[in-house]
Image (cartoon, rainbow, N blue to C red):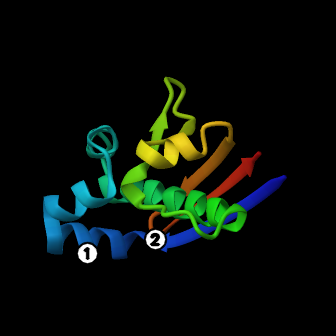
Amino acid sequence: MIKVGTDIIEVERVRESIERYGEKFLLKVFSLGEIQYCRGHAIPEQHFAGKFAAKESVQKALLSINPTLNVWPNQIEIFNDESGSPHVRLLGSLGEICRSYIIEISVSHVKEFATATAIVMI
């Protein structure tokens, strides 16, 4: 079985959430590694938005397989390898439940928008 999830978000919306809620927002949604990665770029909010869209797309694909799953953004980690390619790591109980799943992700962002598509294979 193959399922697809996709998401798009305005970069400005993420920037406003960071300005309004600060570390509380970041730590609720992103891992420390994700925060460090995004802050290491010239326009961090674009990267935060890309990772947010990626998490949403993974969540949509997983829920299309099993709508009873409890999926929270902080259970999905989007990390980049040395070449910059994004990958997905599921954490905690979600990682245990979905340990045999193969998840591929594509993320893109420009000044105003970030988008991501996830493919989950079981």
The amino acid pointed to by label 1 is Glu
- Dividing the picture into quadrants, the one containing residue 73 is bottom left
Residue 76 higher or lower than 66, as above or below: above
- Residue drawn at x 16%, y 62% is 24
At a point 57% along the width and 35% down the height, the residue shown is 85
Q: Quadrant of the C terminus?
A: top right
Residue 74 placement (x, y as % from top left): 36, 54
| Residue found 16% across the figure and 70% down from its top | 21
Q: CA distance from mark 2 to mark 1?
A: 13 Å
Asked whether the residues under the numbered discs 2 and 1 touch, taking CB atoms below 8 Å apart as contact, a structural biologist would say no
Residue 62 in percent (x, y) is at 63, 59
Residue pointed to by mark 1? 16
Residue 13 in picture, x, y percent from top left: 35, 76
Instruction: Report the number of discs.
Output: 2
In the rendered structure, the answer to whether residue 50 lies left or right of residue 66 reads left
Height in image: 22 above or below 74? below
Estimate the x, y position of residue 38 in percent, counting from the top left. Answer: 33, 46
Q: Mark 1: few, some, or many residues within 10 Å (few <14, many ≥20)?
A: few
Q: Residue at x 26, y 60 (%)?
A: 28
Q: Is residue 25 left or right of residue 122?
A: left
Please give the label number shown on residue 60: none
Residue at the right extreme of this rendering: 1
SS at badge 2: loop
Find numbered disc 1 in the image and state the secondary structure of the residue it sits on.
Answer: helix
Camera-side residue of 9 and 62 = 62
First-in-chain label (2 vs 1): 1
Left/right of residue 2 with respect to residue 29 in the rendered view = right
Q: Residues within 10 Å of mark 2 (few under 14, many from 20)?
A: few
Q: Which residue is mark 2?
A: 112
**Which numbered mark, 2 or 1, is in the foreground of this view?**
1
Amino acid type, label 2: Glu
